[in-house]
Image (tube, grey):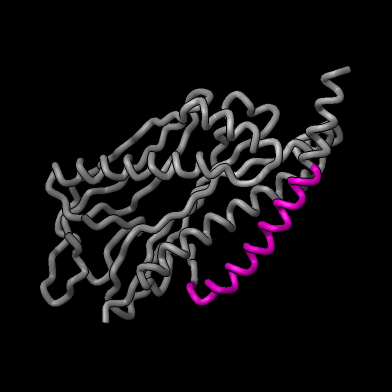
Amino acid sequence: MEQLIATLVFVTLGFFFGRRAEKKHYTSLIEREEKLNALPVIASRIPPYDAPYEQSLVSGSVVIANDYFKAFVAGLRNLFGGKVRSYETLLDRARREAVLRMKVQAKKQGADYVFNVKFETSNISGQYSKKLPIVEVHAYGTALKKIA
Amino acid sequence: MLISNLEFMTGKKIIKHIGLVQGSSVRAKHAGRDIMSGIKNMFGGELTAYTELLQESREEATERMIQQAEAVGANAVLNVRFSTSSITAGAAEIYVYGTAVIIESDTSTSAVAS
């Protein structure tokens, strides 16, 4: 009985706090993405040949966790199968955040492009892996800066 | 040392391929941070402590790779890749590898950084 109450409390807390956190994160993501729109991020392996470029590695990473409510809902979803929306948004947020951090680093160096972008996703939750997923997303690429 | 995850340098010739260089680092976080993150975990959001931890770990792995590349006399590492694996609860291994090469140092462009 006590366990049930504890679970319910965590689920409700997770529902309110998690929702607020997600909304806030999405607003800030959209805002920062607009600012950095001018710097193209390209997945191609072949850099442009028009001029000599200075190359350097840039990367961005983020560790993000799902709240209790979403983990609970995902657990229920597991019974019936289908789309797990709560994890989709989690990973979407993590990837966009990682790309943004990479772009910020590239911008600092005055880069014109970021080429050959690769993503790496890993689950680092260890002993909590069954209950609460903790996901790390790392994005890296090569910043190209035109040599004047 | 020039590090890049492209397969060649723009506008520069590769004189010699030396071979694979690598670096790795295994890190665990201390218990206090673990507990704090556990609490934060319930409400969702970013776990800054872990982000920093992995960032540091990655820097160290890269540093080790650079040392190895310097030891074999390379001046650039190309086609760099990262990989992460969680070994046990609370510890993650970061592995970074790439091809050590010697590129021509053209005097007309100053692209070759230290």
Q: Position of residue A113 (x, y in %)?
A: 42, 71
Asked whether B6 or B95 is in front, the reply is B95
Whether A16 is drawn above or below A108: the answer is above
Q: Residue furthest right?
A: A1
Q: Position of residue A20 (x, y in %)?
A: 75, 52
Residue B10 falls left or right of residue B103: right
Q: Position of residue B2 (x, y in %)?
A: 24, 57
Q: Residue at x 69, y 58 (%)?
A: A24
Quadrant of residue B41 in the image?
A: top right
Q: Residue at x 83, y 38 (%)?
A: A12
Q: Position of residue A80 (x, y in %)?
A: 86, 35
Judged by its main secondary structure, the magenta piece is helix
Quadrant of residue A121 in the image?
A: top right
Q: Which contiguous range is marked in magenta?
A: A15-39
Asked whether A33 or B112 is in front, the reply is A33
Residue A30 falls left or right of residue A9: left
Q: Residue at x 79, y 39 (%)?
A: A13
Q: Residue at x 51, y 39 (%)?
A: B50
Residue A24 falls left or right of residue A64: right
| Quadrant for the C terminus of chain B in the image | bottom left
Q: Residue furthest top?
A: A1
| Quadrant for the N terminus of chain B in the image | bottom left
Q: How many marks?
A: 0
Whether B17 is drawn above or below B54: the answer is below
Whether A12 is drawn above or below B28: the answer is below
